[in-house]
Image: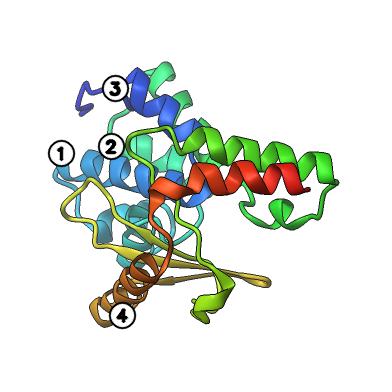
Amino acid sequence: MSTGRPACGPGEEMRAMQAGPTVVRMMLGGRLRRLREANGITPADAGWAIRGSHSKINRMETGRSGFKRRDVADLLTLYGVHDETERNGLLMLVEKANTPGWPPRRRPGSAAALRRQLGKLAEITKLPHIKIQVMPFTTGVAAGGAITLLRSAEPEVADVVYLDQFTGALYLDKPADVQHYGQVMDRLCTRAEPPAITPAFLSRLIKEI
């Protein structure tokens, strides 16, 4: 039977469509898990319905794999979601979840484009829930690449470390790995300049380009 709950509220749906593909996968996976549990369906039974296994369902629900539109459509039918608005909203997230993320952003741009990007960062520093810190080259500290710690609002979904690489992405969810990279990020934040100086730094950098 259907849970009668919307795919997501207006604010949540907007955040999902504006977020990167990794975050969307986690949000969509969490929604599918809630639907499955609300209907008393086991991961094994859900996996069988999409010609897979319980481990495939686990990867989908934790956002560690991509989504096939057919699989999600079949799961929604299994979970009793027949409302077209709800189904279409979730299927739209499938497309967003499978959209390539960072590689387009690696393309070098002109000085004007770089100034616009830095200007956007300067605007973001005004948001109360975002902090941007600058790591001076003189510290000699390096993370070895981009590190993203993904933390879901769902208590059942464990923290995941996302490592962006040239040939793809790596997801680490073992507690020891998450703890290690959490410590790395703590050290980086400690050695970096405080967030309060970032706006002035960006303003000076924009003028120098």
Residue 43: x and y, percent?
25, 58
Whole-Å distance between the Cαs marked 2 and 3? Answer: 13 Å
Which mark, by number, is residue 59? none
The residue nearer to you, when weighing 145 against 9, is 145
Residue that appears at 32% across and 28% down: 81
Q: As shown in the figure, which amino acid type bears the numbered disc 4?
A: His
Tell me the quarter of the image containing the N terminus.
top left
Q: Are marks 3 and 4 in contact (CB under 8 Å)?
A: no
Label for residue 180?
4
Q: Return the mark for residue 79.
A: 2
Q: Is residue 70 visible?
A: no
Q: Which residue in the protein does label 1 denote?
A: 38
> What's the amino acid at mark 2?
Tyr
| Residue at figure coordinates x 39%, y 71% from the top left | 191
Q: Which mark is residue 6?
A: 3
Q: Do the CB atoms of the residues marked 1 and 4 lie less than 8 Å apart?
A: no
CB of mark 2 within 8 Å of CB of mark 4? no
